[in-house]
Image (cartoon, rainbow, N blue to C red):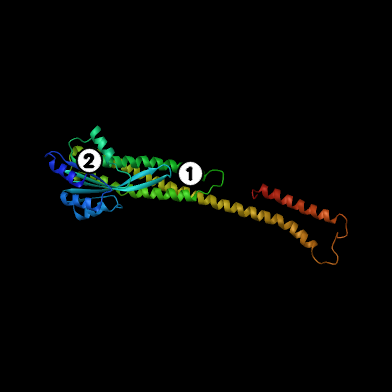
Amino acid sequence: MESSEAALKLLRDADEDGFGWIRMVEPSAQEVQTLARELGLHPLAVEDALEARQRPKRERYGDVLAVALRTLRYVERTSQVESGQLMIFVGPKFVLTVCHGQTDPAPEAERRLLGDPPMPGFGPVAVLHALLDVTVDTYGSIAEEVRSDLGDLERRVFSPGREDVIEEVYSLKREVLEFRDAVQPLVPVLQDFAGPRTGWHEDAMPYFRDVADHVHRTDTEVRSLDDLLNSVLAAHLARVGTWQNDDMRSISAWAAICAVPTLIAGVYGMNFARIPELEWDYGYPVAVAVMVGACTVLHRLFRRNGWL
């Protein structure tokens, strides 16, 4: 970003049919307020530009349109979705973008405008469309990455082994909620842009309808991801319950097996004056054989029933 003074000078020197685009990345409050005074921005719009956690929305202050977007970035190393904010101010002769975070769609939007402009001659509205188009395309790419992560997690949940993935499920759930908070509020905003109330040129409407359709499709995808995550979470909790039941059955089976020799040994340890087979030479090996035989029978029975 050039200095505020240089940007304003270029804006003043623009010809009658031209307009200026001022891009600011992580600006200071003083820089934003200086430009706001020169461009005549509303104080509430300046406040939104300085606050990096705005909900996606659109506001009109006189002849200036203010649009707040959530920018997203997928971090492949951690499978996390990082968010930022882009504030767009569209005036009759200028576009001002204020970006917070590591993702700025402005360079790609500029490349598209200079390479193959889809809306030539529409002025600042063309910049707004390019920024929206790049942002929504990024949403679609991130949705594919999240769905891939969810597919891997789903396979791990239903694998034969016992793998506790509850932490990964909740982590992905948080990322999907972050994703949903960026996409869902943007749907009515873009639907409004695609309507006749905007006052833009009629030829611009199909381009905004296309972006509105894309964000609606992404919103549907994010909702399905959220529902599927809930199902995966429920299935994993059910499997954890099954594992606990299996463990309890195993513990009960081993307790029953151990009870048999304990019972026999306990009888032989009681203080009776006369007890059978105490003076029999084979009494001890027979007692041990009975213990081993009873335990073996119980062990096989429990294994046959799936308790061990």
Which mark sits nearer the N-terminus, 1 or 2? 2
Residue 210's image quarter? Answer: top left
Q: Mark 1 highlights which residue?
A: 154
Q: Residue at x 23, y 34 (%)?
A: 114
Task: From the image, state whether disc 1 or disc 2 is nearer to you.
Answer: 2
Left or right for 31, reference 154: left
Secondary structure state at the residue bearing disc 1: helix
Q: Nearer the viewer, residue 48 or 29?
A: 29
Q: Position of residue 213 (x, y in %)?
A: 30, 41
Residue 222's image quarter? Answer: top left
Q: Residue reaching furthest top?
A: 116
Please determine whether, in this image, residue 46 is positioned above or below residue 217.
Answer: below
Q: Mark 2 highlights which residue?
A: 127
Q: Residues within 10 Å of mark 2 (few under 14, many from 20)?
A: many
Amino acid at circle 1:
Glu
Q: Residue at x 46, y 42 (%)?
A: 151
Amino acid at circle 2:
Val
Tag 1 near tag 2, CB within 8 Å:
no
Secondary structure state at the residue bearing disc 2: helix
- Residue 233 visible in the picture: no
Q: Position of residue 238 (x, y in %)?
A: 52, 51
